Amino acid sequence: MRLLALLAVLALAVTGCSGSDPARPGVLTVGIREPSTLLPADLSDQAGRLVTGALWTPLADYDAASGKVTPRAAESIDSADRVHWTVKLRAGTFHDGTPVTAQSYVDTWRAVAAGHWFSTPVLTELLRAKEITAPAPDTIAVTLDRPSGQVPALLSAPGLVPLPASVLASHDWNGFAKAPVGNGPYRLDGPWKPGSGGTLKRVGQGNAQEIELRVGEPAAQYDAVKAGTLDLVTEVPGEKHDAMHADFGDDHHATWALPRAGYLAFPVADPRFADATVRHGFALGVDRAALEAGPLAHQADPAKALLPPSDAPGERSGTCRPCSFDAAAGKALLKQVAFPGGATIYFGPGAEEWTRTLTVGLHKALDVSVTAQAKPGTGPLDGPATLDLKLATASPYELLSQLASESGYTDDVFRQNLALADAAATPAEAGELYRLAENQLLRDLPVAPLWSGHGHAVWSSRVHDVTTTPFTGPVLAGVSV
């Protein structure tokens, strides 16, 4: 009996499940990885955004493809001149019972702008407001330093949700992340338990009365959903990718675009990479399908455009020639310009494995010496660098400006098109200008697109109404059991 009890304990530790029957009326059980934090402004991982997406309600939802803004905590986000913006709030309260007011947002954004968090650049580099005030409890007034139509997209960022006055006064960010207080349809019942998870209780509009979040490894959680001891898992490991379709069918799994993409950035100021022909040669030498099936473990798609689907203003009409794998053409381009050969490709944290696979593939395809090396802390690079970019907003402006910055690309026409897109009066006009800027980057190729991330979820037969968004993945408040 003691042996059986020990085996039962070990089984629970592996699966990350509580061992209880998930088929309880109104209770949804969800398997996730350990979130990096539950402080919204410092989040860039899928697990954390899934949880905070249930704990908070953003000002609005923004769809990059259509430019459509769906008000949530805001009643409206309007401007007559795209310089002076007014946000009208719906009535709302935090989970501690205090009201959510315009001052809540003003004070939160002041803290975010002063911090060194993942979402800080949304305010300091993208929004660039001259003044943000609360002229009335239900009104936020934003004055920009230039006309911008991107304000609804930026203010809809999941990192700009409001924080209660208690943590804004104490600045105990670490303590708050362990017991977050939001304004969303669910509250956390007790503190978050690292390595275990937490329970969400419904306090607003949500289908499940209670959501049990269980931290564990995706492979074991996948098997638990298949066995009926877990309702939903929000990540499918690479080894389960092909089986997913047969195990769960079209009605019980989903794939969605993540706000994440990989690139190869060239040092355009370096004489060896100053010619766009060299850059195109390297781009054509990348076997993106091998990266997707290998080190990226089916968690990404080979790039078909510069802008990933999560950030793209509608479908791209033309083909992306630099996204193709054509070793012969790539080798011919390098020979055409007498590329001297030999290149070091630098990688940052978390990108070593797929960068090393990339370098092996480039060496084989282009017949030049290519090695991989960790990126130094300071100083210019003498070779290309891989980028694994995680986005804080759905605005193409964020990504396009970051790509130009990472490569040192300073073309005036590109900068002008980017500025015009930012200032555009309508989403359609902005989308056309963003595509012009994207096309110019694909022509000059200071960065080569490699892959775009996607997420997977599978769920049991008792689960219904699963919808996904790029930033949250499955929308927990909408899931029915």
Image (cartoon, helix red, strand yellow):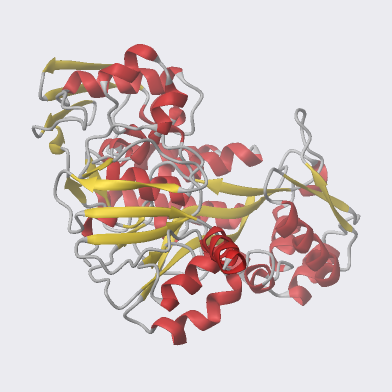
Q: Quadrant of the N terminus?
A: bottom right
Residue at point 61% right, 52% down?
444
Residue 13, above or below 376: below
The residue at the point 65 percent across, 41 percent down is 407
Q: Percent x, y for residue 306? A: 52, 57
Depth check: 264 or 111 in front?
Answer: 111
Relative to residue 7, is residue 370 drawn left or right? right
Is residue 445 visible in the rendered image? The answer is no
Residue at the farthest front position: 1
Q: Is residue 251 left or right of residue 273?
A: left
Q: Quadrant of the C terminus?
A: bottom left
Q: What number of labels is visible?
A: 0
Residue in front for this viewpoint, 112 or 242: 242
Residue at 88% of width from left, 68% of height from top? Answer: 367
Residue 150's place in the image compared with 29, above or below, is above
Q: Position of residue 69 (x, y in %)?
A: 21, 48
Tell me the residue at 77%/28% (across/down): 379
Query: How far from the left and from the top, in percent, is residue 378?
Result: 75, 28
Q: Which residue reaches farthest bottom?
A: 246
Residue 198 lies left or right of residue 218; in this view the side is: left
Q: Residue 322, image x and y in percent? A: 62, 65
Q: Is residue 322 visible?
A: yes
